[in-house]
Amino acid sequence: MIDDAIAFLKNIPPFSLLDEAALGDITAAMVMEFYPKGHVILQQDGPASGYFGIVRSGSIKVFIRTHEGEEVVVDNRAEGDFFGFLSIICGDVSRNTVVALEDTSCYLVRKESISGLLRERPGFADFFLRSYLKKLVGITYQQIHDRTLLYGGGDKLLFTNTVGDLATNRIITAHQDISIREAARLMSDNRVSSLVLLDSDSFPAGIITDRDLRDKVVARGRDLSDSVRHIMSVTLIKCETGDYCFEALLKMIRYNIHHLLVLTKGELKGMITNHDLMIFQGESPLSVAREIENRTSIDGLVPVSRKISRIVEILVQEGAQAGNITRIITEINDRLLEKILQLTEKKLGPPPVSYCWIVFGSEGRKEQTFRTDQDNAIIYSDPLDHCEKEVNAYFSAFAGQMTESLVKCGFPKCSAGYMADNPEWRKPLSAWKQYFHDWISMPTPEAVLKSLIFFDFRPIYGNNMLAEALRAFLGQTLKNRSLFFAQMANVILANKPPVDFLNRFRLEKAGDHINTFNIKIRALSPVVDAARLAALELGIYSTSTLERLSALKDQPGTIGVLCKELEHAFEFLVSLRLRHQFEQISKGLQPDNFISPDSLGMIERRTLLEVFRIITMAQDLIKKRYGPMM
């Protein structure tokens, strides 16, 4: 049996990493156990397992039972898969139930043997920490047990169901040349709020909705005998049946629409509406976006803006992945900011020259969660000399009103003054180009610091071509600027993750935050900075950290080989920060970024140390690339 077990384990990672002697030690004290179909191997909340199980033949089911009695399957496992790892690590009770799905044989390795390998064999420990890192992104096991995402609740639909699960197959269509009267009659007879209009090839050419009939026909007294093509919306926003519902939600928010055509490989299959989402989801981010659109004053936006933080809280409670939370909040915050800009422009009148309102920092990277400070600026077209005074006066008043309006809506002022109401950060395009040129050509510590802030800029409203022109200039100016990148690397490497050479946490030793670390500065920033450095060097224009890491995978240069691990690490850190701040808000405290490792479970602490190890590896690659020039 021992020879058979050794041969089996040699093909099963991470046991395949062990030498013959180590495998012999394990198998000498290993037993084989047979479990008939239906046998309960481990019981949730029962005694922790004293063994690490490896399925030799057959299959098992791992599940959690909720307080309401609902069974939630965590995983089905077959030959070569494991169970009992969490029991060994946590050591108190079994976190889930394990049942034999069929007659099953398992090797049982003593807890002491596995614990010894985790301590003494780094490669063996790395395998488990890396495999559990992805599973732990955004959740802990206790939160799996408690959260409503897995057990029901409205927003479950957003992240677990596809558009095809929800979309109606009943679409009313008509030719685009029928009259408005005929179109309205079809909609009335079929009791639908939209009509898809087809071209001569029976391909969707446009859509009309109840809103079109109200705003373009009734309100304007249009002749009902006119062709319906004169009022249809030509730009059709579509999604695929396999898209998750939260993707449909993002599109509805982004384009301010209430109907999405659903296609399968280009063929029209159905439609999904905001009403469909609202029925299943209850109060949703889409309803907040619609409220923003309907407000006509800053004071009217204030109560709506407060709901945005509540959406974050709901999504955190429901276990949504951190990346999905930030994407939804980015869309809503962008809509709120656009509305404030529109109202301010309406109040002051049209600007004397075209402009673009840009954001940077976490907002520029699409990584906002709970409300953060303002980070914004204005780029405007270079004015004629005789108009310069008028332009300065307009944008001074504009930026001042914007700052105060954003404060009203819950966005505090930036303590460092990186806002458009600072004359330094509202400039014509030529001045911004000069800024960027000077920072790159003369990379002093202050210049590099400003680069780390402003090079994450993203246009929000106005003439986006101004921002794109600046982005193109940035890309050209960065070419062959090895000294600048070396100086940027120097600044980045000065911020090490909070772990020492013995793989222990390095925490604050005094003050109000003793025995904690700043997750934003010491953990998230190193990942953000590493991704930015590599992306700028390769001319990647994305500003989001996750988008940058995705684009950098397998690319030559600094951190390409670690991008997958850094993605998981970043998601884990953002999720940890979100949960920490949510817990503080729930207790009536002001949210901060200081986390105590003692407040985390054992698995989370070990995962956090693994994250810090990955960040250190990324910084080592940066040092190796730029070290000789520093």
Image (cartoon, rainbow, N blue to C red):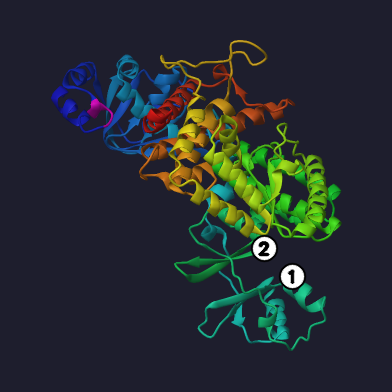
Name the spot of residue 503 as percent of width and height, x first: 42, 17
Residue 211 tag number: 1
Q: Earlier in the sequence, mark 1 or mark 2?
A: 1
Rendered location of residue 95, percent (x, y) = 47, 26
Determine which residue is flagged by label 2: 258
In terms of depth relative to the viewer, which is nearer, 57 or 630? 630
Quadrant of the frame with the N terminus:
top left
**Residue visible at 19% across and 26% down in the picture:** 5
Q: Nearer the viewer, residue 551 or 80?
A: 551
Labels 1 and 2 touching (C-beta < 8 A)? yes
**Which mark, by number, is residue 365?**
none
- Pick the residue in front: 299 or 464: 464
> Which three-letter amino acid code belongs to the residue tagged 1?
Arg
On the image, the x and y values in percent for residue 197 come to: 61, 79
Residue 291, above or below 598: below
Q: Amino acid at mark 2?
A: His
The secondary structure making up most of the magenta span is helix
Q: Is residue 222 magenta?
A: no
Choose top left, top right, bottom left or bottom right for residue 384. bottom right
Q: Quadrant of the C terminus?
A: top left
| 217 left or right of 472 in image | right
Q: Residues within 10 Å of mark 2 (few under 14, many from 20)?
A: many
Q: Secondary structure at mark 2?
A: loop
Q: How far across and how far down the image is residue 240, in percent?
A: 50, 62
Which residue is at a point 29% across and 16% down the rendered structure image? 113
Which element is circle 1 on?
Answer: helix
- Residue numbers of the magenta segment: 13-17
Q: Is residue 137 left or right of residue 446?
A: left
